[in-house]
Image: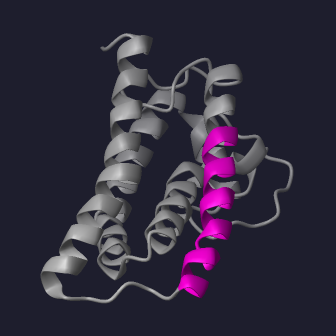
C-alpha cells in the first residue's frame, strides 16, 4: 500500500493529466482535424461548471482527509466512511465534480475535441464505480449497504437522515 504522500503525488499527476493534458490534446486534435474553436460566449459558459466542479472536488477532498482520515486516492482510502457534505447528496460527488470541472475547462479553452475527450473518458466510469462499490461494501460492510440504499449513485437528491 502506498504512503499518504505517494497517494497525493498520484492525485496531483491525475489532475495535471486531466486539467492540462486533456485541453492541450483537444486543442492539438482540433488543429489536426480542422475543427473551429467554440465562440467566446461558450468559453464564458465554461466558467460555471469549472467553478462548481472545483468547489465540489475541494469539499470532497477536505472531507476525505478530515472525516475519513484518508486520501481521495483509492490506494490510500479513507478509514471512515464519509457520508456528509456532498456525499449525503450523491455517492459519487468526486466523479461528478471532475466531470463538471473538466467539461468547464474544455469549454473555457474553446476546444470541441477536448469536450469529446472528456465525454469519452466518462465511458468506463460506470464500470469503475461498480468495482469500487464492491470494494466499499467489503471495507465498510453494513454501514456502506445502508448508505447505498439511502443515497443515489449519480443524480443528487436532497439528503435525509442516513440510518
Percent position (x, y) of residue 101?
Answer: 54, 59
Q: Which stretch is magenta? A: 40-59
Q: Is residue 77 rendered to the left or right of residue 75?
A: right
Q: Examine the image and state in which quarter residue 69 appears.
A: top right
Q: Nearer the viewer, residue 85 or 30?
A: 30
Instruction: Look at the image and say whether residue 104 sits in the magenta stretch.
Output: no
Q: On the rendered image, what quadrant is the C terminus found in?
A: top right
Furthest-left residue in view?
A: 32
Most foreground residue, 38 or 101:
38
Q: Does residue 9 appear to the left or right of 162 in the view shown?
A: left
State the residue at coordinates (64%, 67%).
47
Work out whether residue 63 can be spotted. Answer: yes
- 107 lies above or below 25: below
Image-quadrant location for residue 144: top right
Q: Determine the residue positioned at 65% across, 40% down.
A: 58
Q: Position of residue 52 (x, y in %)?
A: 68, 59
Q: Residue most toward the right?
A: 161
Residue 52 belongs to magenta span: yes
Q: Position of residue 129 (x, y in %)?
A: 40, 54
Q: Is residue 38 left or right of 114 when viewed as pictured? A: right
Q: Residue at x 28, y 63 (%)?
A: 124
Is residue 147 placed above or below 112 in the rendered structure?
A: above
Please name whichever residue, 61 or 43, is drawn nearer the observer in this view of the structure: 43
On the image, the x and y values in percent for residue 151 come to 68, 57
Amino acid at each position: 500500500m502506498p504512503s499518504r504522500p505517494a497517494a497525493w503525488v498520484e492525485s496531483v499527476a491525475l489532475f495535471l493529466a486531466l486539467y492540462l493534458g486533456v485541453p492541450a490534446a483537444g486543442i492539438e486534435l482540433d488543429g489536426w482535424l480542422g475543427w473551429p474553436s467554440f465562440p467566446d460566449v461558450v468559453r464564458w459558459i465554461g466558467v460555471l461548471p469549472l467553478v462548481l466542479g472545483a468547489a465540489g472536488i475541494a469539499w470532497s477532498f477536505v472531507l476525505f482527509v478530515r472525516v475519513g482520515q484518508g486520501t481521495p486516492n483509492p490506494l490510500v482510502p479513507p478509514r471512515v466512511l464519509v457520508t456528509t457534505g456532498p456525499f449525503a447528496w450523491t455517492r459519487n460527488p468526486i466523479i461528478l465534480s471532475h466531470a463538471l470541472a473538466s467539461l468547464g475547462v474544455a469549454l473555457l479553452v474553446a476546444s470541441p475535441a477536448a469536450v469529446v475527450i472528456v465525454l469519452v473518458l466518462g465511458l468506463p466510469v460506470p464500470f469503475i464505480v461498480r468495482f469500487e462499490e464492491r470494494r466499499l461494501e467489503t471495507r465498510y460492510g453494513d454501514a456502506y449497504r445502508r448508505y447505498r440504499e439511502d443515497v443515489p449513485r449519480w443524480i443528487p437528491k436532497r439528503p435525509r437522515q442516513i440510518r
